[in-house]
Every structure is written in C-alpha cells, then in structure tokens.
C-alpha cells in the first residue's frame, strides 16, 4: 500500500557509499599552468569594415579574488571530500553531466547531475550535487542519490524538482530497474530546513509510475517539473515515442503518488523518434521576465522542448497550451519540435530549464559532450562539461523564437578588459589584437559593413550551408568575416567564428553564423566539424556576436544587441527573426 504522506521520514536517509574523486581539470576558475600563447585575430576576407570589440580576460581568480566566502559558505566547504578544494570553483568536467532537478532553495542554487563516479564513460549513473550562491562559483557536496534500490539499480537518471506552495520539494526521477525497465520514482529532502539539501529519502512505494500500455519499457523517461492546474491538480510530462513519432505523455496527480494518464499526449511529431529530457514552460509575451512553470493566461506563450535521441540535438517550438484538453499546439507547424528551431547549433544536449524565483528569470542548463575519443576521455579522467547557464525569454520583436544570453553573473569573472573601437579592416586582412595570452575570454564584437560594398556586390543564387561549405576558407564578395580565437603563432591551430553573407537575385541579404573546427586542434583523435545556421539580421542591425572561450569550449551568440542591451552597451545573444535562432557551442581539444 502506498504511503499516504511521502513528505515524512518513511525510510532511512541516503548515505552514499561513493566518494567523489578529485577532478583533474576544473573549468572556468582553474589552477591550470599557463597555457601556450594563443592569439585573438580579426579575419576579414572582403571589403572594408569598421569593428568594435570588447575583450575581457576571465578565469583564474587565485591570488586576486576577494574573500567571497561567508561563515556559512565556509561551513559548506567543509562538507566536501578532504581531497577537494574548500574554495568555490566552477562546475567541473563530468561524465555524462545531464542536468537533473536544478532549483533555487533557501539562498542556494542546486545543481544535480548524472555522474559516473568510477570512470569517464557511460555507466553506473548516480546523482552528483553542487551548490552555488551565484551560478558561477560552486561547492561540491556528497552524492545526492545512488543506485541502491531495485527500481534504480541500473541508474539514477534524469529528474525534475517541483517546489510546492508550502515550500516543500518534490523530486521525480527516472530509474532504470534491475531488468532495465524505465520507471518514475519519488524522492524528497530528509530535512526541508536544510538549505543544502544534503540527505534525500526515496519514497518507500517507488516506483510511482511504470510504462503504460503501448509504450516500450525502454522508452519512458525524464519527468518534467510539475505545473498546477485550475482544477487544483499537478500535471507532469514524460518523454516517449510510438513507432517513429516522438511524444510527450501527460499525467495528472494530486499527491505525486497516484497518477492519471491523460487520453491525449501533450504533443507529438511524426518522424522525430524518441523524445528525451522533455521540457515544458511558459514565457511572457512582453519578454521582460521569467515565469513560474504554472503560469498561464492570454499574456503567455508555452515552449515545448525535446532532446531527440536519434540525432542528439535539442529542439523547441513556441505555441499555445490548452489546459482543458491537456494539449499544446505549435504556432507554426513547419517549425514544430524536432523539425525546426534548436537551442544551439553546436554540441548542446539534454538541456533543462528552471524558474529562478530569486531573480525572476528562467535559466537554461545544457550538457556539452566534448569531441575527444573515449580513449582520450579515459586517459584524462573526465568526459563532458556543463555549459554556462543562460537566461531564456521570448523575442518580442519577432514573436517566433527565444532569446538566450549568458547569466549576468558571468561578468563577475572578468579580471581586466581591452576595447578596440572603430578598427578599420581592409579586404583579405587578418589583424592581430594585442592581448595577454589567455584561454578564458569574454568577447563582444560588432561589425559594420561598408554600404558601398554591399550595394556593389554581385547578386547570385548561391546556396550556402555552414556544415557543407569549406569552412572559413569558403569565400565570396561578402564573407567570411569574424574572429579567429585560440590561434597559435603560426595559425596552424585556429578556430574561426564568423559571419557569411549572400546576396540573392532580388538583392536581399541572407546571413549565416558559423564556427569552423577543422583546424581547432593538431590532435588527430578529435571530431572536427563546421557548425552553423542561417541568422536573420533585422533591418538596421549591425552584425554582432559574443563569444565565451573557456579552455576547451567556445560558446558563441549571434545578434540580439538591440533586443537585450541597455543603450550604450554592446551585448549580443540569441535573438533572430523568423524560423531560426542561433547559438553555437563547440568543444575543442583540452589545453
């Protein structure tokens, strides 16, 4: 019989038997030896430009960082393994790293993630746990949940947290049973008064959900955060598929123990395959702030996002949610989930959002699987990283896509900066920028093309694609132009991040934003690709970009200056018109 009150101590709190090993290569704030000299260069392959750049060195605060630890933070640091540092650090490279149940609770941001404590390969998945005051500097705590029950013996997989009106936390997660059946389980904090949420209790009646009739036992995973309905019930979605149609199942519950499957799926798209890590959340039509997951009404649009197991990319669409029918309808079926917009056009998967009630924003987490071989991962001792958290909101100028932008706390990592204003760049030029050697940079750039060059450029019917082009070596009268980052002295290693513009027969311009990995590393066991997509540039806008360089990761954001920035500050993010929005996350060979 199911326990009638799962929020009381009904079983022993978890005492993980695993200990986290010392990480070999923390990211963002690190103690790495000084890397080989790397340069930042302007690469322009056609007529005259004016360029503005703001480049900030970010990263190692050792020796220069002010004391940011309060007494409470010092107490938290003491909970870490003796082998670990007692100072804040950013999220370390991890094996797998899919976000599970992120939330803000009693002054702390909590990040739970899938983690293999034994090797830098998939398997033996448990939940790692880290906390932060600012989403940037992190303290790692003991493992939150381990695979110690029959219903999660083969892995504690992705889950989601729901904060109830009385402040209690409900955590639903997928467990892979001793027979590899995917089931949904309930857990909750052993001590709700503990802001660190150190101990978790698994509900004694688990599993609370098993695959329904018609759903394969291995196609039923990743419950969403619950949202509240006008009937006083909670509603969740779970990813699945029927044949080749990816779907998001819908369940209603009043107590998170007993559930009723709704007759219709929230949504489904033929041909998209298994939907993993489904996310469902509201965005404000005025785009000014984030919304609690339960928000609804005429001033709200809803986002459905799915991670497609078939191609390992994250797709989303905007649409209208009907609470009465428990269904969601896309605004534009031509760019439905899985066939249209992506969060990111590089390597970015299994992402998850949460509502940050502390700052009234919705925050997006994404998992970055590096391009090293498994042999290289095992040798270095870690695999995969977590991307910089991003805010997510509706682009109110287009109404057809989301805006993404690194959380503002990233700017606190800036140590010093250089500005290059009105740099004149001539055809065929590669202009070095005088910077100190660094592999952690925050780059903001704005490009203004010569109008006469645009007017005189010949029209063509060129069909361009970043992925199928020759990368930065592919040239025409209007491109490429951009930045070469992490370039060595000989330019044998370089990573171009650039725009490419075509001019159609009717004189219309079409812009692409690309990242070329083909010469990013001298290593021969790295997957080197060219990433990118079409980027609509609105009338009157300049070509703008922001690049975060962090040792082995480059995150690039194109356009968005006029839509997100206060006057006088150049800031670009994820903001595009029409059926595309663009961001690119690219892994490189670690330094």
Image: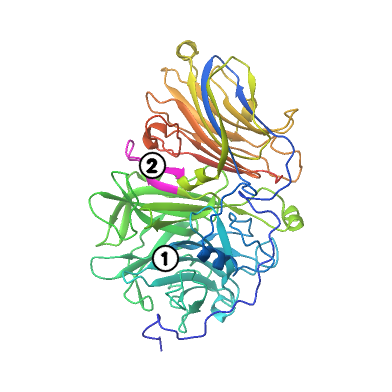
Q: Nearer the viewer, residue 215 or 511?
A: 511
Label whose residue precedes the other's in the sequence (1 or 2): 1
Image quadrant in which you'd find residue 278: bottom left
Residue drawn at x 74%, y 55% is 380
Which region shows up in magenta? 391-407
Neighbourhood count class around disc 2 (C-alpha, 10 Å): few under 14, some 14–19, many 20 upward: many
Q: Which mark is residue 458?
A: none
Query: Quick one: SS at disc 1?
Result: loop
Q: CA distance from mark 1 to mark 2?
A: 33 Å
Mark 1 or 2, which is nearer the eye?
A: 1
Question: Where is mark 2, residue-wise?
Answer: 401
Q: Residue 273: percent from the left, percent from the top?
A: 50, 56
Q: Residues within 10 Å of mark 1 (few under 14, many from 20)?
A: few
Location of residue 79 in the rendering, given as x and y in whole percent from the top left corner: 59, 70
Which residue in the rendered view is the most extreme toward the bottom? Answer: 1
List the residue tagged with mark 1: 106
């Amino acid at each position: 019989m199911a326990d009638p009150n799962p929020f009381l101590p009904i079983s022993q709190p978890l005492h993980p038997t695993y200990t986290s090993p010392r990480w070999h290569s923390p990211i963002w704030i690190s103690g790495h030896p000084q890397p080989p000299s790397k340069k930042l260069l302007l690469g322009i392959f056609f007529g005259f430009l004016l360029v503005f750049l703001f480049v900030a060195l970010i990263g190692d605060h050792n020796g220069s960082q002010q004391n940011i630890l309060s007494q409470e933070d010092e107490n938290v640091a003491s909970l870490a393994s003796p082998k670990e540092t007692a100072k804040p650090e950013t999220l370390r490279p991890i094996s797998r790293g899919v976000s599970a149940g992120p939330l803000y609770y009693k002054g702390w941001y909590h990040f739970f993630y899938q983690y293999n404590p034994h090797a830098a390969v998939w398997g033996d998945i448990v939940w790692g746990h880290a906390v932060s005051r600012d989403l940037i500097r992190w303290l790692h705590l003991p493992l939150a949940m381990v695979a110690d029950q029959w219903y999660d013996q083969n892995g504690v997989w992705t889950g989601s947290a729901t904060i109830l009106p009385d402040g209690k936390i409900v955590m639903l997660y997928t467990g892979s049973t001793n027979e590899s059946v995917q089931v949904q389980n309930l857990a909750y904090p052993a001590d709700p008064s503990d802001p660190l949420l150190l101990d978790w209790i698994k509900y004694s009646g688990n599993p609370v959900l098993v695959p329904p009739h018609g759903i394969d036992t291995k196609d039923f995973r990743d419950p969403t955060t619950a949202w509240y309905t006008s009937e006083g019930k909670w509603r969740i979605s779970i990813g699945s598929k029927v044949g080749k149609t990816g779907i998001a199942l819908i369940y209603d519950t009043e107590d998170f123990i007993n559930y009723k499957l709704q007759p219709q799926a929230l949504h489904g798209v033929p041909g998209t395959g298994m939907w993993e890590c489904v996310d469902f959340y509201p965005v404000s039509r005025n785009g000014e702030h984030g919304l609690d997951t339960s928000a609804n009404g005429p001033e709200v649009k809803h986002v459905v996002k799915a991670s497609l197991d078939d191609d390992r990319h994250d797709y989303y669409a905007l649409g209208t949610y009907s609470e009465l029918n428990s269904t969601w309808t896309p605004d534009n079926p031509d760019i439905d989930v899985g066939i249209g917009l992506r969060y990111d056009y590089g390597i970015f998967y299994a992402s998850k959002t949460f509502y940050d009630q502390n700052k009234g924003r919705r925050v997006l987490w994404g998992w970055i699987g590096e391009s090293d071989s498994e042999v290289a991962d095992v040798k270095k001792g870690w695999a995969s990283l977590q991307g910089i958290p991003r805010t997510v909101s509706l682009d109110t100028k287009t109404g057809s896509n989301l805006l993404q932008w690194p959380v503002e706390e990233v700017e606190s990592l800036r140590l010093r900066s250089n500005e290059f204003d009105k740099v004149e760049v001539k055809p065929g030029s590669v202009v070095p920028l005088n910077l100190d050697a660094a592999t952690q940079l925050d780059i903001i750039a704005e490009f203004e093309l010569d109008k006469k060059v645009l007017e005189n450029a010949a029209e063509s019917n060129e069909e361009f694609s970043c992925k199928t082009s020759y990368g930065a070596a592919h040239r025409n009268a209007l491109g490429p132009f951009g930045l070469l980052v992490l370039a060595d002295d000989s330019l044998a290693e370089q990573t171009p991040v650039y725009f490419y513009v075509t001019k159609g027969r009717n004189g219309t311009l079409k812009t692409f934003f690309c990242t070329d990995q083909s010469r990013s590393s001298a290593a021969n066991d790295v997957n080197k690709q060219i990433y990118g997509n079409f980027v609509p540039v609105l009338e009157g806008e300049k070509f703008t970009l922001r690049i975060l360089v962090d040792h082995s990761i480059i995150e690039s954001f194109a356009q968005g200056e006029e839509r997100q920035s206060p006057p006088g500050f150049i800031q670009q993010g994820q903001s595009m018109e029409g059926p595309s929005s663009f961001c690119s996350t690219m892994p490189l060979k670690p330094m």
